[in-house]
Image (spheres, rainbow, N blue to C red):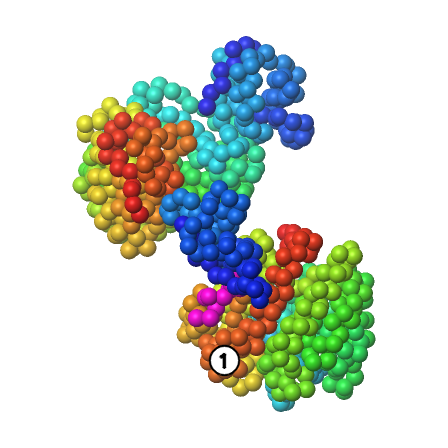
Amino acid sequence: MINFFNFKGLDEHNSRYLITNDLGRYLFVSKDELVSLIRNKVDYASNFGKIAVSNYFCYNGSLQAFTEQLKPLYRDSKNYLFTATSLHIFVVTNACNMKCVYCQAQNGKILPNGMMSKETAKKAVDIAMSCPTPCISIEFQGGEPLINFEVIKYIVEYADQIAIENNKTVEYNLVSNLTLLTDEIIDYIHQHNIGVSTSIDGDEILHDQNRMLRDNQGSYQLVMQGINRLRSHGVEFGAIQTTTRKSLTKARDIIDTYVSLGLHSVFIRNLTPLGCASEHWLEIGYSAKEFVEFYKECFDYILELNLAGVDIQEGHATLMLSKILSGYAVNYMELRSPCGAGVGQIAYYYDGNIYTCDEGRMLAEMGNDAFKLGTIDDSYDDLMNCDNCKAACVSSVLESLPSCSDCIYSPFCGTCPVINYALGQDIYCHEPNDYKCLIYKGILDTIFDALQVSEKEKILKSWVEKGE
Amino acid sequence: MIIKLSDYDGKYRIVSIAKDSHTKEMLLHDDLEMMLVNDHHVTFLPEGISVTVTENEYEMLNNRSNYDVLEIHENGNAFVYYDNDSVDNTLFITNRCNSNCIMCPTAEGARRCSDGYSVGELISIVKHIPDDAPHLTITGGEPFLIKTDLFRLLAILKERLPCTDFLLLTNGRAFCSKEYVKLFEQTSPSQMIVGIPIHGYNDATHDYIVQADGAFHQTFIGLKNLLAIDMPIELRIVVSKLNANFIIEIAELISQEFRGVSCVKIMGLEMTGNAAKNKDSVWIDYPSAFRHSQKAIDLLIKAGIDVGLYNFPLCSVDKRYWHICEKSISDYKIRYSSECEQCKVKDACGGIFAGTIKLAEKDIKPVEQL
């Protein structure tokens, strides 16, 4: 008997197909094999039959026994549903000393510079710690969060205190441009084991074209100094890359920059059409097709480097491969069904308003609070039970969305109701193959192309194993 | 599982099995006595005493896994106390019980005479259990008959096996003592579920089956006390001719008074011991037992309580309830009838108790079409 599955032709002659099922298992099959599956005429004794059974595309026994087998596997593939909100984003200020061309966190207009007060922070931490999960993550964002370092310290100390009293664990992460580091800050980061994430868009020229200080000076040198100071204090960091039109011709340079900085992961990110990015789209934006070509170039180059023994991975790919190769979903908020809005992450804004996610608060900065959950005077239960939270969850369940449910990539993909709303005025995306969809499809096409080549498959497998 | 050693030196021993030098080193490092089974030699270490074994005995020992725990009696009978290859391991405290349920699968004689283990022996055995043991069932008879010694044992389990899941099977009567509840709360491992049977919905109906006055009252209070400390509870209802007519009343009682329990298991009969002796008043075939339970299952689920069906072959259960049937019978007790070869869902069915198959056979109907 056959299980549910999706399929897609891989070449013009339709002689080879990719099939995937709900558990995220995949197989490359011939046309004959696909037909035998569709017609429920699989020869279980053949090689194809055995592989199809072991990947849950079909079964040779009772439906009852097959269902029992699938239960723990389904749980693994949706494991993020079994935990309460794990990521708590504290937007401690919207003030920033930089003005990156694509900044999502401001709308390009001059907003009043707000700082989160200790009172607000305390109430927000109380909500975060009331979350019924033993382990949470607190992420400091902004603007530039270090501008409000005093409150960061307060949050860490207060949260640690509650954590000890209630037998919980808190992990901290700082998303910073690294231009305002002082020795005191670096010591504090080191002492409290705070993870650090920053942005490095490429070499000095490219980076400075995207990311400049308010006086138009480039930030690359400051970032490099910051990195060196962190490292000399034993603090490691991660970096992500954001792609603008200028990046499209510099794929190799970008990767080389990351390798030369001793980094082992580069997250090739497309622009999100929010905030300054949408204002400047004509200058810095591009089509999904253009991004996908750029991504492919980065990816292929990264594999080339891996074959030469260089330890470097691409971020999206590593996340998706965990599900593709091991059936275990990493709790990355944009690649889950439902997405992380509210139930996976919450964003506490400096003014005490609370949003479904980072993108939700950015939309509010643009003037639209459609994704507001409530305020710091609400309880965690109130925040989760509000209509906005439910709407965001319902609209991001891929299994229920018309184009997504039939797509071979739905086990590995995700949709963002905030972006759908910002671009199309509806939390449901009306256009199959819109910008984000084409980009994810393009990334997954690239990954699955590579998985068909055995030496590339080996490298990709090692990326997943390293994470374990 | 018992392996009989014909040529044995008569010393009572608790040993871990080691079949290779890595395991041997690990056990030596942890200061644990072992039986090294290797290259057709059997040796007790660190004592350094060799044992002469027949081909057959060697093969049986060699079929054991590394880290299995054997309890060897003076007469040379080696009892596999812990099977490292199995997820179904039991810590057996005593055969004795302060109840005498009419349908108890253990014979009354066995329960009255045997002495069980001293807590010192149990603690020695527990020290050998590897700390990656996934699950242990603590049972008897009635474990609380060793009184506060049980808490000593629990404390050792809590300390040595922090990652193991535990199921404590008890009639729960001891928990009517607040002092016992407090000690339990302090010493119990954190992943603990307490499995408690309930046979009736009031003193009359419950005590009659348990054959002990005051049992219902004590169990009732015990359950309330456990719920008050948020202890996960699994309530077990053994469906027999004695209570088939009021299973739904029991379910109503549970949903009103014990709604906080983790789950309820509806259990099919094991017709050995007392149950076999009292067959005429106890035996009800599995299809009838299920039919008498069906409304109770619906009621419990509506009340938000998880329900599982233990020991029922799928053919005795309405198809819509198959997904709550569990393969609950211990491996070595599972039997199927010859009819079962025709059954389309045999691969999903947990079979029937060895002790009950003769009685149940006539009701077995292979499922032909789905």
Chief secondary structure of the magenta portion: helix
Residue A313 x, y percent position in the rendering? 70, 61
Q: Residue under mark 1: which chain is it in?
A: A
Reply above or below: A316 against B39.
below
**Nearest the camera: A340 or A23?**
A23
State the extent of the magenta-drawn residues as a range: A402-411
Query: Horizontally, is A138 left or right of B187 in the view?
Result: right
Amino acid type, mark 1: Tyr
**Nearest the camera: A170 or A344?**
A344
Query: Horizontally, is B112 left or right of A389 in the view?
Result: left
Q: Which residue is mark 1?
A: A421
Residue A259 x, y percent position in the rendering? 78, 64
Query: Horizontally, is A296 left or right of A417 in the view?
Result: right
Q: Quadrant of residue A329?
A: bottom right
Q: Residue at coordinates 75% horizontally, 56% vertically from top-left? A: A307
Q: Residue at coordinates 40% horizontally, 43% vertically from top-left? A: A61
Q: Quadrant of residue B250?
A: top left
Q: How many marks?
A: 1
Q: Residue A403: within the magenta? A: yes
Reply above or below: A433 against A16.
below
Residue A159 x, y percent position in the rendering? 59, 64
Secondary structure of the residue carrying tag 1 is helix
Q: Residue B109: within the magenta? A: no
Tell me, yes or no, if residue B169 can be seen here. Answer: yes
Tell me, yes or no, if residue A198 can be seen here. Answer: no
Residue A6 x, y percent position in the rendering? 48, 61
Q: Residue at coordinates 64% horizontally, 81% vertically from top-left? A: A286
Q: Residue at coordinates 69% horizontally, 65% vertically from top-left? A: A299
Mark 1 closeness class: few <14, some 14–19, many ≥20 residues within 10 Å: some
Reply above or below: B359 against B365.
above
